[in-house]
Amino acid sequence: MKVTFLGTGTSQGVPIIACKCEVCESADPHDKRLRSSVLVEVDGTTILVDAGPDFRQQMLREQVTDLDAILLTHEHKDHVAGLDDVRAFNYILGRPMDIYAQQRVLNHLKVEFSYVFSDNPYPGVPQMRLHPLDGDAFFVKNVGVVPIKVQHYRLPILGFRIGDFTYITDANAIDSREKEKLLGTKVLVLNALRREAHISHFTLSEALALAAEIKPQATYLTHISHQMGRYQEVVKELPKNVFLAYDGLMVDI
């Protein structure tokens, strides 16, 4: 299995155009973060988790030419706004894009992208085949996926486990039953927005505490705000098996 971090950033915080902090002005490429998304390639199947506003740029950068499915954690703009660009894959692959998400999220897509789902769609609009998730495990082609229910403040959203890899973003709480699904995972990805408390995201200390509880072989932190600080400084503070993810990072599992 190969995992590529397409983006590790967030729309939270001060817009970069208005910010003069050391992170936003950093020349270190590790500090240049697109909106969070991850690509998983396993057994000939390619799965994307979330397609935010930077989806097209991320696909072009990584030269992705095949994509079997998109899994959506939730409906917020920074995780779905790029879905219009699946039309390129429709053209290349000659089929609709399979989209997996909770029914609430799929209902949101039908409103947000109403032109896709109209009775008489305009020629060339994106083609999407929607698959509702109810919390049960499912398959994308030959690859098993286990949804993990987490809380994004009051909004129930999903993380996903694929084999020994687990991806959770935009969470600030996980109940004990869902935590059991994390046990035994080799690589765990968790959101860690910043150091200060936040109403709907894990802080750095909260993410580290959860990683220490689950005890994976390696934990990667994502959905990182500029408020966290510069990459080269933060990595010095992390336990030896915890890493700050960055855009373009590839991990073999």
Image: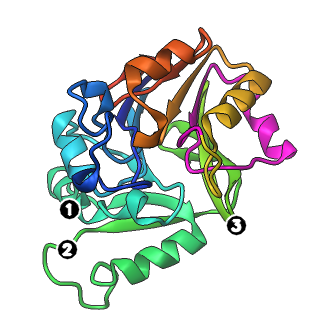
Secondary element at tag 1: helix
Question: Of marks 2 and 3, which one's residue comes earlier in the chain?
Answer: 2
Q: How far apart are the alpha carbons under marks 1 and 3?
A: 33 Å
Q: Nearer the viewer, residue 74 or 125?
A: 74
Badge 3: residue crowd in 10 Å (few <14, some 14–19, many ≥20):
few
Query: Which residue sits at x=76%, y=37%?
Result: 181
Disc 1 crowd, CA 10 A, few/some/many (<14, 14-19, 20+): some
Give me the residue at 74% from left, 29% from top: 209
Inter-mark Cα distance, 2 to 3 = 33 Å
Picture disc at residue 125: 2
* Residue 63 in view here: no
Residue pointed to by mark 3: 154
On the image, the x and y values in percent for residue 118 come to: 31, 88
Cβ atoms under marks 1 and 3 closer than 8 Å: no
Give the x, y percent position of residue 190. Answer: 59, 36
Q: Residue furthest right?
A: 176
Tag 2: residue type? Val
Residue 238 is left or right of residue 22, and the answer is right
149 is within the stretch colored magenta = no
Residue at image coords 74%, 19%: 215
Q: Is residue 172 left or right of residue 19?
A: right
Q: Distance of mark 2 from mark 1, alpha carbons?
A: 7 Å
Residue 106 % position (x, y): 50, 72
The answer to whether the residues at label 2 and label 1 have Cβ atoms under 8 Å apart is: yes
Three-letter code, disc 3: Arg
The residue under label 1 is: 87
Q: Residue at x 62, y 58 (%)?
A: 157
Q: Is residue 239 left or right of residue 243?
A: right
Q: Which residues are magenta?
A: 166-195
